[in-house]
Image: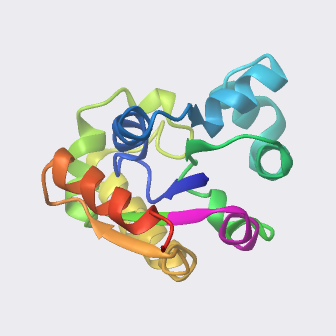
Amino acid sequence: MKIFLIGLPGSGKTTIGKHLAERLSLPFIDLDFEIEKAESQTVQKIFAERKENYFREIESKTLKGLCTGKGDFVLATGGGTPCFYDNIEVMNNSGKTIFIDVQAAEIVDRLSKTILVERPLFAKLSPEQLKDKIQWLRSQRIPFYRQAGLTINSDISMDELVSKITYYIRPSP
């Protein structure tokens, strides 16, 4: 089974994905990392040199390649992945989608503790601008995220999160 984790940057898709993949004995894939391998440059460089539109095209192409490929996996998408082209539809038709729902204030707190220059959409923002950007992104992206098969609030322990997702993805008898 193909499992897709979606949500805002900083929502914990990679962290949760690694735990889930381990629990399910599936490979874990980070979509941004796959793009970096294919393009031989970082996401930050792609954004800087070729801009976001190019990145979104490569992102969609890479996602579709993974969806049509053989094998099961747990995939952490980029925050914007479900919001461009027909990506959310492709993911929903290819496997199970899970929206990791985290409130904007928590995202801002988490991102404030990271290296923002590694996140192209936030690299040059002040703390106040970061807060505004996250709130705006959430308002724009939530209609796409809500198309996921399952929405999970991340205000529970990692073990509970993984257990809830595992229960959701189990095939019906």
Q: Which residue is more in the foreground, 65 or 159?
A: 159
Q: Is residue 97 above or below residue 51?
A: below
Tally of numbered tags: 0
Q: Is residue 44 left or right of residue 123?
A: right
Q: Main secondary structure of the magenta part?
A: helix
Q: Is residue 1 left or right of residue 26?
A: right
Q: Is residue 103 left or right of residue 170?
A: left
Q: Which residue is more in the foreground, 105 or 167?
A: 167
Residue at x-position 28% and y-position 64%: 104
Counting from the top left corner in percent of width and height, residue 129 is at: 36, 55
Q: Is residue 132 something one can see in this rendering?
A: no
Q: Which residue is more in the foreground, 28 or 122?
A: 28
Q: Is residue 114 above or below residue 169?
A: above
Q: Quadrant of residue 70?
A: top right
| Magenta region includes residue 79 | no
Q: Which residues are magenta?
A: 89-97
Q: Is residue 44 above or below residue 7?
A: above
| Magenta region includes residue 95 | yes
Counting from the top left corner in percent of width and height, residue 82 is at: 64, 64
Q: Quadrant of residue 74?
A: top right
Toward the front, the furthest residue is 173
Counting from the top left corner in percent of width and height, residue 90 is at: 76, 66
